[in-house]
Amino acid sequence: MYVKIMPNRTGPLVAALLYDGLCTFEFGVVAEIFGLSRPELGPGWYRFASCAIEDGPLRAHGGFSITADCGPETIDEADIIVVPGWRGVDHPVPDALCDKLRAAHARGARLASLCSGAFVLAATGLLSGGTATTHWRYAEKLRQRHRDIVVDDASLYRVHDRVYTAAGSAAGIDLLIEIVRQDFGPAAANSVARRLVMPAHRTGGQAQFLERPVAIRDGLEIAPLLDRVRADLASTWSVARMAGQARMSPRTFLRRFFEATAQTPGDWLAAERVNEAKRLLCQGQADMETIAMAVGFGSAHTLRHHFRSKVGLSPGDYRARFMSEAPAATS
C-alpha cells in the first residue's frame, strides 16, 4: 500500500503510470524529478511510486521489461498523478483508467501529462472547456478528436482546473519543475533544475520550438568570452570590445559568434541579461532600476522592453507569479 512507499518522507505522493509500450524517456523525467532522494529539501519531499495500470508483462520503448511498485489502486491515494506519454495517439484509453482519474481529480488530486499523455487526460473529459497542449506533431489530431478542448500547439505547458499538460519530452521537465515551484517554492525548483543541469525555469507560454533553439558553441575561441560576459553583465559589451577580447577583427568575430551561438551578439547578450534578471526578481524585492543596472540594461524602461519581448510578461508580473508558492490559476 502507499503508506509503505518511502516511509521516511511525508510529502505528496506522486504516482507515475506504467503501461505496456511505456514512453521510457518521459517516465524517466518523472522519476528523476520526484523519485530521487533529496535530503537537502527535508522529509516533506515527494513520495514516488510507479503504478501499473494493467497486468504484466509490461515492456517499455527500448525493448526491456518493467515491473511496477504498485498497481492501479495507488491512483486512489495519490496527490499527483502523471501520465508519461501514451502508447499511441490512436490507441484507446481504458474506461477503468478514465474512471480512476476522474475520481482522483474529484477528491482534489492534480493530474499531469507529458507529450502524448494529453490524449489520456482528454479522454477523461476533465479538459473539456479548457486549454491543453501536447507535442506539436499530435496537436491537430487532439484538436480534431476533442473539439471541446482549445489545443494550444505552441506553448510548453498549460494548466486547466488542476489538470496539467506538457508539450514534448523536454517541456515535461519544465512543467514538473513548475509543479515543484508551486509546492516548495523557487529555491527548491532551482535546486532540482541545477541537478538536471538546465535553466531554472521556462514559463509555460514559451514557444515549443524555435528556428535556432540551442547554442551550437563549436567555436572554442568564443566559449571563454561567453563565460566572461556572463560573469560581468553589468558592463558595456560592444561588438568592438568582445571582438578585442576574442582577439579577432569585428568582421571575423561576428561570423564566428554566429557560428557558435546561432545568434547575433546583441540578441545573445539581451537573452543572458533577461535570464539573470529573472533570477534576481525571484531572489528578493530589489527595485527594477537596481536590477536593470545589475544586469546591464541601464534603466528599468529598457529592462521592461527586453523582458517582455523575451518572456511575454512584465518583470513585475513575472516576480508576482514566480515568487509566489501558490499555484497559478491559469487556464
Image: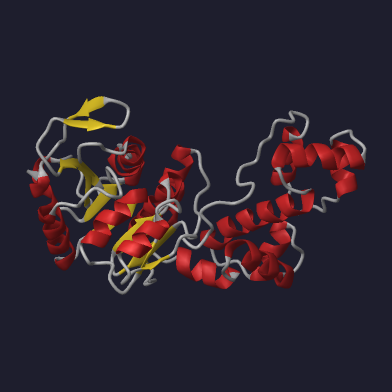
Frontmost residue, 200 versus 42: 200
- Residue 283 x, y percent position in the rendering: 53, 58
Q: Answer with the quarter of the image where residue 136 lies.
A: bottom left
Frontmost residue, 37 versus 93: 93
- At x 59% / y 71%, what residue is drawn? 314
- At x 37% / y 49%, what residue is drawn? 115
- At x 69% / y 69%, what residue is drawn? 305
Can residue 219 be seen in this snapshot?
yes
Above/below status of 12 relative to 320: above
Frontmost residue, 190 versus 242: 242
Quadrant holding the C terminus: bottom left
Residue projecting furthest to the right: 249
- Residue 278 x, y percent position in the rendering: 58, 59
Frontmost residue, 171 versus 9: 171
Can residue 188 be seen in this snapshot?
no
331 relative position to 124: left or right: right
Above/below status of 255 relative to 275: above
271 relative position to 151: left or right: right
- Residue 171 x, y percent position in the rendering: 44, 50
282 relative position to 94: left or right: right
Colour mode? secondary structure
Quadrant holding the N terminus: top left
